[in-house]
Image (spheres, helix red, strand yellow):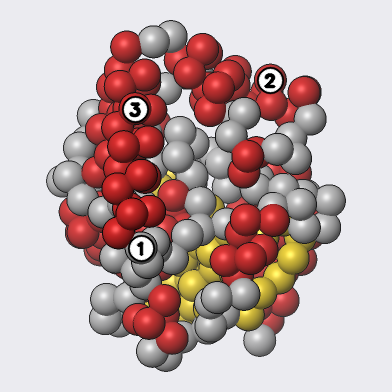
């Protein structure tokens, strides 16, 4: 079994750009950024429970990583940069911490490297279970209206919040709930040390108004890039700046 993905072919000789979306997104989330790199082949993957992979279940980040690996192999992708946002960033970091032949570099936007305190894990597990129950039982518009009131989304204005609620409410609530718990930060190992031991470039992007993840960036052994005029959705709020960052990495 492989994950659903959208592939766009570029010119031979370049590594692929492989994009992973955030929670409740899909393969289209990175299109605006990815299509600025026409010379590169791009693969936009639907993670389990999302988009064209809505009927594919995973019980852990390890299973998600295995599905990503099988999907890359199915496209015969031998050299690639891995780019992930939020949930996709966590998947990307976890994936990159295993030996990966052909991985040229890692780009993460607003992804959490892992909790370090068992009490935090317990609180997160309870919180994710409560959200998952709501996703299973309540109308998606109602759940996402509350979801986007969380502090990490505080920089959104009313129009941005409304647009995201409308977009994300097209999902299957049960599928989202399953993936939310399977990939919960409560179950993710702390990836800080494995990421320090890496042998590939690691770039970390965060919006200037995303205080939580700017603080997390300081804990990582990554090259940090602050995206101006953006919060936790930097690639949506300021795609041109994100494109400029990626162009800089790829040129080096």
Determine which residue is flagged by label 2: 162
Q: Is residue 75 above or below residue 80?
A: above
Q: Residue at x 48, y 18 (%)?
A: 143
Question: Dot 3, how many residues are within 10 Å of its Cα: few (below 14), some (14-19), or many (20+)?
Answer: few
Measured as percent of width and height from the top left, residue 113 is found at: 43, 65
Q: Nearer the viewer, residue 145 or 127?
A: 127
Q: Earlier in the sequence, mark 1 or mark 3?
A: 1
Identify the image quadrant of the C terminus. bottom right
**Is tag 1's residue or tag 2's residue first in the polypeptide sequence?**
1
Q: Residue at x 62, y 75 (%)?
A: 218
* Helix, strand or loop under label 3: helix
Within 10 Å of disc 1 (Cα), the crowding (few <14, some 14-19, many 20+) is few
For residue 229, above or below residue 140: below
Q: CA distance from mark 1 to mark 3?
A: 20 Å
Which mark is nearer the camera, 1 or 3? 1
How far apart are labels 2 and 3 at the CA level? 23 Å
| Residue occupied by mark 1 | 117
Residue 79 position within the rendered picture, expressed as x and y whole percent measured from the top left: 40, 76
Residue positioned most to the right: 229
Mark 2, Cα crowd under 10 Å, few <14 / some 14-19 / many 20+, is some
Mark number, residue 130: 3
Location of residue 50 (image quadrant): top left
| Alpha carbon distance from label 1 to label 2 | 34 Å
- Mark closer to the chain start, 2 or 3: 3
């Amino acid at each position: 079994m492989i994950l659903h993905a959208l592939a766009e072919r570029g010119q031979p000789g370049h590594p692929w750009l492989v994009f992973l979306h955030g929670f409740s997104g899909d393969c289209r989330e990175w299109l605006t950024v990815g299509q600025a790199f026409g010379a590169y082949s791009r693969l936009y993957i639907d993670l389990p429970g999302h988009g064209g992979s809505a009927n594919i279940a995973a019980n852990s980040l390890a299973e998600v990583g295995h599905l990503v690996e099988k999907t890359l192999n199915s496209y015969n992708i031998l050299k690639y940069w891995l780019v992930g946002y939020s949930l996709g960033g966590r998947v990307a970091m976890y994936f990159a911490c295993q030996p990966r032949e052909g991985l040229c570099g890692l780009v993460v936007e607003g992804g959490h490297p892992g909790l370090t305190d068992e009490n935090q894990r317990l609180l997160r597990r309870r919180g994710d279970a409560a959200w998952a129950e709501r996703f299973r039982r309540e109308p998606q518009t109602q759940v996402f209206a509350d979801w986007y009131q969380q502090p990490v989304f505080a920089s959104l204005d009313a129009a941005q919040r409304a647009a995201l609620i409308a977009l994300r409410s097209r999902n299957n609530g049960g599928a989202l709930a399953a993936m939310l718990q399977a990939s919960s930060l409560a179950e993710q190992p702390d990836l800080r040390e494995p990421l320090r031991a890496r042998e590939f470039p690691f770039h970390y992007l965060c919006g200037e108004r995303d205080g939580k993840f700017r603080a997390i960036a300081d804990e990582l052994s990554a090259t940090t890039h602050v995206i101006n005029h953006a919060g936790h959705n930097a690639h949506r709020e300021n795609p041109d700046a994100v494109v400029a960052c990626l162009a800089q990495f790829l040129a080096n």
